Amino acid sequence: MAIEPSTTTTPPGAARSTASVAFRSALDVIRDVEPRVADAIAQEVTDQREMLKLIASENYASPATLLAMGNWFSDKYAEGTVGRRFYAGCRNVDTVEALAAEHARTVFGAAHAYVQPHSGIDANLVAFWAVLSQRVETPALAAAGVRQVNDLSEQDWARLRAEFGNQRMLGMSLDAGGHLTHGFRPNISGKMFDQRSYGTDPETGLLDYDAVRAAAREFRPLILVAGYSAYPRLVNFRLMREIADEVGATLMVDMAHFAGLVAGKVLTGDFDPVPHAQIVTTTTHKSLRGPRGGMVLCDDSLAEHVDRGCPMVLGGPLPHVMAAKAVALAEAGRPEFGTYAQAIVDNARALAEGLLRRGAKLVTGGTDNHLVLIDVSGYGLTGRQAEAALLEAGIVTNRNSVPRDPNGAWYTSGIRIGTPALTTRGLGTAEMDEVAGLLDTVLSAASAAPAAKGGLSKAKHVLDAAVAEQVAKRGSDLLAGFPLYPGIDLS
Ligand code: DSN
């Protein structure tokens, strides 16, 4: 469950672990050129060691994954795909890209894996392009009797562009836990697609599949998007595929948040998106515990469209990150990753139970996955005030809207917390109860500050410094029992 011991702990008799020597040497080399960068890197690991990291989308990658990124692959251009590059000299890039894709296919049971996207947003853009081009370009090209989009006449190309801008997407609403890239205005997807969203049941907070079906029947989207970044329950992807098929939509699942639970076989059957969706996107750095990056999995029908991601919508691939993806996916294929993934969920449940017992209000009343959404209006706070108060006490979280949030997306009424990072450190269900106690202590003690113009501020809070100090101390005492990268000494 804790980070790979073989790469992080000090072997008996050895002065320092191999990873410790590697990181220390790297910092020495950097320090010779720009010491402030070396110091910032060292400070970052100190901060990450000392803080109670509850951001649901963050984790700690293994030293092997981190080290795979700092090398000569960074200097190589490799547009194209394995064996079909626009640059010469890509044989080693081919090796790591093929390995990453192979591990991804094995871990997720996918027909095809495209490991080049630089982030989740990029992975989603590749997926949108692939679905659009499969649905629009292929028939248009066939009708025009050409094989390549570049061979289209100006007139056909103009028609194609008009088609692209006239497509519909149905995704989960932002305040129900959907993501910006699922067709919302602040993201290009909201400009590419005519978007409608489905929400959650006002009473239970749960996804209402009948409502999704009704919306799909009425709107008839090209793409039905499932997946979330702030929904604390499972999604039945078999049902979502049924709905998509009924209206002729492609089911796209964004599993960025819960990819680790899929890889670890905690989400199986109806809750595993890969057998049900035609296309699945993810990031690689959240519960999957890899390097920062993205990935697309798809069935054979979409493979050639997905593989045109670069240069269609992506800049040149990052071979050093693909190397790290290969390492992290190899780790995710090991049996112990399944133990880790189950522990993430057990910990989230324990955290939710600890909060509920202390009287906190949770969206949907609990969790089935890696995250918990606290409605902090129960504490008389906005999400922004709660986030700042918790940070003062050494607890790092992020504010998030709750369904039908009266405080909007900036101030919000929620705090989203997740267990992937603390679970990597080895904290278990007993410690989660203690973490719930720390959260509740801060949120109960904090209050809204008076606003300059009278009434209460939505942004500023008041928290007794003694409470902040006491919680920070209890947090760091707790973490001291679960050292991060125990074999790595940078002093
Ligand atoms: N930034 C990610 C998250 O925190 O959920 C999603 O894009």
Image (spheres, grey):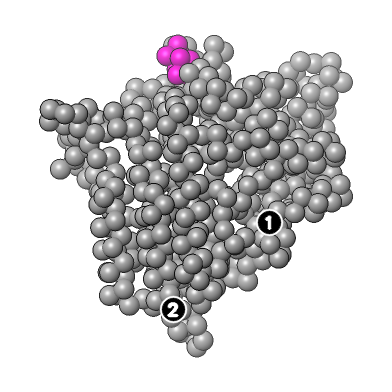
Indicate left or right for 356 with 465 as reference.
right
Residue 52: x, y in percent? 35, 55
Count of labels in the image: 2
**What crowding class fits label 1: few (fewer than 14 Cα within 10 Å), some (14-19), or many (20 or more)?**
some
- The residue at the point 34 percent across, 44 percent down is 425
Q: Which residue is drawn at 68% across and 56% down?
A: 206
Q: Which mark is residue 206?
A: 1
424 shown above or below 177? above
Callout 2–callout 1 Cβ contact below 8 Å: no
Measured Cα–Cα span from mark 2 to mark 1: 30 Å
In the displayed structure, 201 sits above or below 107; it is below
Q: Say which residue appears at 51% left-offset and 17% top-offset.
A: 98
Q: Is residue 419 above or below residue 8?
A: below
Q: Residue furthest bottom?
A: 454
Queried whether the magenta region covers residue 91, the answer comes back as yes
Label 1: element kind: loop
Q: Quadrant of residue 361?
A: bottom right
Identity, as a three-letter code, of the amino acid under mark 2: Ser
Which residue is at the front of the view, 380 or 384? 380
Q: In which quarter of the image is the C terminus?
A: top left
Question: Front-most of 166 and 301?
Answer: 301
Predominant SS along the magenta part: helix
Find the magenta span and give its range: 90-97
Q: Mark 2 highlights which residue?
A: 447
